[in-house]
């Protein structure tokens, strides 16, 4: 079984991006990100409605990092501390050497290759540092943009589950993509 320790918090960098720990100062961007119905369209979670909700979201992420149950990074452009998205291994299954990756980005940064670049670095961290055997992503079948980004990062569609998730009075389908550590 994996033994993980995210202390000290690992900072990641790519050509254009700086992936750092979320901070309380990110609260306004978290509120914008998680309260936008269009951004949240494919994420079956309640919208964040207040600063307090956004602070609670940051606290949940911090708690998972402190207990080594998950790790999320703020996505920023190099040279700017402004959060433009979130990415991480938010559900880690150490007994299976597997984690689920998740990501979101502010709408004005869609289509710029930022999520693709961030996924590449977070997957590299998962395989090389965390020593994961596989990484999965669970997406809505209609989230074609996310499917395209995952395929660019060499994730493979593993399954399409019919009505396996109940949210707000409806049963929703899920598609699972995964990538194996070939090292």
Image (cartoon, rainbow, N blue to C red):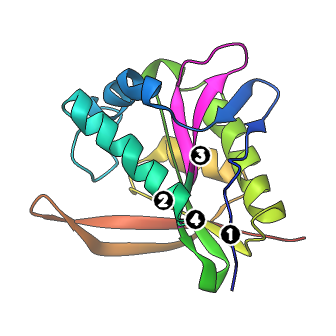
Q: Position of residue 162 (x, y in %)?
A: 32, 74
Q: Which of 26/155 is in front? A: 26
Query: Spatial distance from mark 4 to mark 2, Cα to Cα?
Result: 6 Å
Residue with the mark numbered 2? 64
State which quadrant residue 98 falls in: bottom right
C-alpha span from label 1 to label 4 = 6 Å
Q: CA distance from mark 2 to mark 3?
A: 28 Å
Q: In front: mark 3 or mark 4? A: 4
Residue pointed to by mark 4 = 68
User: What secondary structure is found at the residue carrying circle 3?
Assistant: helix
> Is tag 2's residue or tag 1's residue first in the polypeptide sequence?
1
For residue 74, side relative to residue 31 (left or right): right
Q: Tag 1: Cα neighbours inside 10 Å, few (<14), some, or many (≥20)?
A: some
Front: mark 1 or 3? 1
Q: Nearer the viewer, residue 109 or 21?
A: 21
Magenta region, residue range:
72-91
Q: Are marks 1 and 3 in contact (CB under 8 Å)?
A: no
Q: Position of residue 29 (x, y in %)?
A: 41, 23
Callout 1–callout 4 Cβ contact below 8 Å: yes
The residues tagged by marks 2 and 1 sit, at their Cα atoms, a distance apart of 12 Å
Q: Residue at x 73, y 40 (%)?
A: 11
Task: Point out the residue furthest to the left here.
Answer: 169
What is the quadrant of residue 130 in the picture?
bottom right
Q: Which element is circle 4 on? A: loop
Q: Which residue is mark 3?
A: 148
Residue displayed at 66% across by 30% down: 113
Label located before the other in sequence (1 or 3): 1
Q: Is residue 40 visible?
A: no
Name the residue nearer the viewer: 124 or 180: 124
Circles 2, 1 touching at the beta carbon (< 8 Å): no
Q: Secondary structure at mark 2?
A: helix
Q: What secondary structure is found at the residue carrying circle 1? A: loop
């Amino acid at each position: 079984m994996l033994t993980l320790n995210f202390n000290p918090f690992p900072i990641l960098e790519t050509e254009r991006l700086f992936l750092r720990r979320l901070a309380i100062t990110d609260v306004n961007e978290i509120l914008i990100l998680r309260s936008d119905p269009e951004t949240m369209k494919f994420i079956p979670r309640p919208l964040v409605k207040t600063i307090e909700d956004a602070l609670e979201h940051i606290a949940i992420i911090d708690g998972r990092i402190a207990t080594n149950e998950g790790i999320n990074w703020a996505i920023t452009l190099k040279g700017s501390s402004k959060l433009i998205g979130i990415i991480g291994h938010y559900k880690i299954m150490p007994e299976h050497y597997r984690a689920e990756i998740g990501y979101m980005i502010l709408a004005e940064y869609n289509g710029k290759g930022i999520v693709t670049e961030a996924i590449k670095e977070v997957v590299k961290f998962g395989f090389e540092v965390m020593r994961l055997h596989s990484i999965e992503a669970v997406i809505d079948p209609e989230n074609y943009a996310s499917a395209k980004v995952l395929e660019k990062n060499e994730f493979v569609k593993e399954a399409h589950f019919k009505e396996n998730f109940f949210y707000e009075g409806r049963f929703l389908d899920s598609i699972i993509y995964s990538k194996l550590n070939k090292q």
